[in-house]
Image: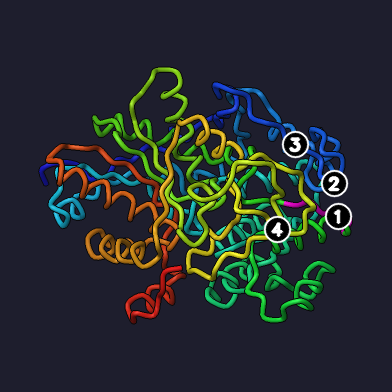
């Protein structure tokens, strides 16, 4: 072997603090607004759905927030995660580019989501919460929260977007194994779900609808809090262990990224990978180009508007300044269920506005083409969401070949697709269509 292909850190290298990009933003992040008064929302306005300790993280101006030891102990089940160089893909593409990927699929749930699920379950347990309610798109978040709740002795109820509930039954089964109850959303368990079904009995669901159901469940049930797997500041915060580890591993590789790429739906895995690099970009003027890749079927960053909008369809959440297609937007039933969200994390949207990151949108057939090429080169079957980052990296590698220039590409492989094989079956059978 002419060069190393894997860069592994020891367990003592798990970060001891999460990084908060808000401390270094060149312009302040616009505050969330109360949905009724349209005035800046304070901690009391969020207390009905989140515990105080997470509200304080959501609004924290601190650059570093210490990771509690019990959380780091659980992280050690799978962290630090590997950084791998995709040399076989490089050969297949005949490119001078060096392609690296940070692989989060080694977690118990198979994705990056436990990074925040474990933290949120811990803080809720500390606050006296007995039960968590949440939504999930493709099931990655729901299964991760179910896993985390099982470790801390919390009950867990998941509203899973109906199209994914039907497309990805094994995700639902994982949640059941970890003790969660799971409902297809829109469901008959909430007033809002019943109202949606009355208007459209065949509604495929959306993350916005599922969020509305989970919040309604939360506010009507004692000792219950709501847990969100993306979008919010504290969720992005918890994911920054990904980027911190990646910086150390790229130093081991003796290279620095020219291009950094991640898929985006709500923005949490992307934020986790790139925010620590953005810190360097702001402080040192690093020239690394950072690219968010989203589906053309739900292009909040490339075709949405930057404005205040609700995070859910019923309009129960605070208004957040974000790239949005509108909270009533009903995304088509593409197989990348985790990217079917109408809006983008406020911090990611703000970084986009400030020119710190770029965004592109890709159709799902091109995404699956890239995913299959990656699987046949490197062996790992990417999650349909992660495959967007794969497709973005392949596009950059081909551009490097055309230019005849070396380029160091790093992308986030946010999860594996072993429970998404029906999506691949549809692609290989020619049954997938672009929307």
Q: Is residue 8 left or right of residue 435?
A: left
* Residue 219: mark: 1
Against 214, residue 195 (above or below) is: below
The number of numbered discs placed on residues in the rendered structure image is 4
Q: Position of residue 163 (x, y in %)?
A: 58, 74
Cα distance in 3D space between marks 1 and 2? 6 Å
Cα distance in 3D space between marks 3 and 1? 16 Å
Residue at 70% of width from left, 58% of height from top? 134
Residue at 85% of width from left, 46% of height from top? 48
Q: Residues within 10 Å of mark 3 (few under 14, many from 20)?
A: some
Q: Nearer the viewer, residue 106 or 215?
A: 215
Cα distance in 3D space between marks 2 and 4? 14 Å
Q: Magenta stretch: give its range.
A: 221-226
Choose the circle earlier in sequence order: 2 or 4.
2
Residue that badge 3 annotates: 55
Choose the circle earlier in sequence order: 2 or 3.
2
Q: Nearer the viewer, residue 232 or 308?
A: 308
Mark 1–mark 2 CB contact (< 8 Å): yes
Residue that badge 4 annotates: 134
Q: Position of residue 222 (x, y in %)?
A: 89, 56
Residue that badge 2 annotates: 48
Cα distance in 3D space between marks 2 and 3? 11 Å
Q: Name the image quarter holding residue 348.
A: top right
Q: Is residue 133 left or right of residue 266?
A: right
Q: Position of residue 292 (x, y in %)?
A: 43, 45
Q: Nearer the viewer, residue 263 or 324?
A: 324
């Amino acid at each position: 072997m002419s060069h190393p292909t894997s860069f592994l850190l020891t367990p003592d290298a798990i970060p001891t603090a999460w990084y908060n990009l808000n401390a270094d933003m060149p312009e302040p992040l616009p505050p969330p607004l109360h949905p009724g008064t349209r005035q800046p929302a304070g901690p009391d306005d969020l207390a009905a759905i989140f515990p105080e300790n997470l509200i304080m993280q959501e609004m924290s101006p601190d650059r570093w927030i210490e990771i509690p030891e019990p959380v780091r102990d659980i992280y050690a089940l799978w962290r630090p995660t590997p950084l791998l160089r995709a040399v076989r893909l490089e050969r297949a593409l005949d490119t001078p580019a060096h392609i690296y990927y940070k692989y989060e699929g080694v977690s118990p749930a198979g994705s990056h989501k436990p990074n925040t699920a474990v933290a949120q379950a811990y803080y809720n347990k500390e606050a006296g919460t007995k039960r968590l309610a949440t939504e999930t798109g493709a099931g990655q978040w729901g299964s991760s929260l179910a896993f985390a709740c099982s470790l801390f002795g919390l009950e867990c109820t998941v509203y899973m977007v109906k199209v994914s509930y039907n497309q990805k039954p094994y995700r639902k089964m994982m949640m059941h194994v970890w003790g969660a109850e799971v409902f297809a959303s829109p469901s008959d368990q909430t007033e809002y779900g019943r109202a949606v079904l009355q208007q459209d009995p065949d509604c495929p669901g959306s993350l916005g609808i599922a969020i509305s159901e989970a919040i309604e469940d939360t506010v009507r049930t004692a000792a219950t809090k709501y847990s969100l797997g993306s979008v919010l500041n504290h969720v992005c915060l918890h994911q920054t262990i990904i980027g911190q580890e990646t910086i150390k591993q790229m130093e081991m590789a003796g290279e620095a990224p020219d291009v950094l790429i991640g898929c985006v739906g709500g923005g949490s895995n992307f934020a986790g990978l790139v925010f620590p690099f953005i810190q360097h970009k702001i402080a040192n003027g690093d020239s690394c180009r950072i690219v968010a890749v989203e589906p053309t079927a739900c292009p909040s960053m490339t075709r949405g508007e930057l404005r205040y909008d609700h995070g859910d369809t019923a309009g129960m959440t605070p208004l957040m300044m974000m790239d949005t297609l509108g909270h009533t937007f009903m995304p088509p039933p593409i197989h990348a269920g985790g990217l079917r969200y109408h809006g983008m994390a406020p911090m990611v949207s703000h970084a986009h506005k400030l020119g710190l990151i770029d965004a592109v949108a890709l159709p799902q057939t091109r995404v699956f083409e890239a995913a299959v090429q990656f699987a046949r080169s490197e062996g790992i079957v990417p999650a349909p969401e992660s495959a967007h980052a794969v497709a973005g990296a392949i596009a950059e590698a081909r551009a490097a070949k055309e230019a005849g220039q070396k380029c160091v590409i790093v992308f986030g492989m946010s999860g594996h697709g072993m429970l998404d094989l029906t999506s691949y079956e549809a692609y290989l059978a020619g049954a997938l269509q672009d929307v």
